Image: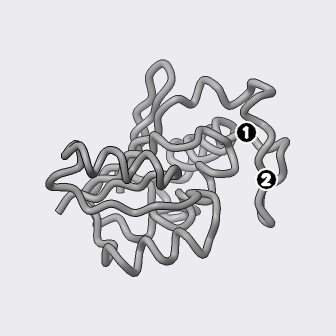
Amino acid sequence: DLWEAEYNSTCVNIATKQGKLDGFNVLVGDQGNDNTLDSWIEKSGGNFDVIIDDGGHQNCQIMASFDKLWPTLKPGGLYFIEDLHVGRWRGYRKYSTPRCEKSFTFSDKLKEWLDDIVYMGGYGGRKWDVHFMLCQAEACVLGK
């Protein structure tokens, strides 16, 4: 099954009428909202092979989505995060959640996780079940 999550319900309605979402299961809402994410997981059933976060690009939205969706990713699954290059731009540091300050930058969290993989990976002391991370300009993929 293919699942698409979109913030803008008007966009979804137009695309649906135009047949652009045929074959997709569509979820609507703010990826930074825990209740929205919980409803997406409940509706979809989770258990994803691949997750691609090409959403709102606000650091706290990316973190909120990762916190909720990573546990639903199957072992061996891939989690892609795009457009990370905007994370330090002021225009993308306006969004916060109860657990994430506007000053947070997701790429800094990735650096922490990379240190965890490199320095703790062989000793069973890792904080996350991220087995690998591959990054390029603007995007990273994390493997479970």
Q: Is residue 15 left or right of residue 95?
A: left
Above or below, 67 against 120 in this view is: below
Q: CA distance from mark 2 to mark 1?
A: 11 Å
Which residue position is annotated with label 1? 105
- Label 1 sits on what residue type? Thr
- Label 2 sits on what residue type? Ser
Q: Residues within 10 Å of mark 2 (few under 14, many from 20)?
A: some
Element at label 1: loop
Residue 132 x %, y %: 39, 45
- Residue 96 is marked as 2
Is residue 105 or residue 32 the one in the foreground?
A: 32
Residue depth check, mark 2 versus mark 1: number of the one nearer the observer: 2
Residue at 33 percent across and 54 percent down: it is 4
Above or below, 59 against 72 in this view is: above
Residue 79 x %, y %: 38, 49
Residue at 40 percent across and 63 percent down: it is 27
Q: Earlier in the sequence, mark 2 or mark 1?
A: 2
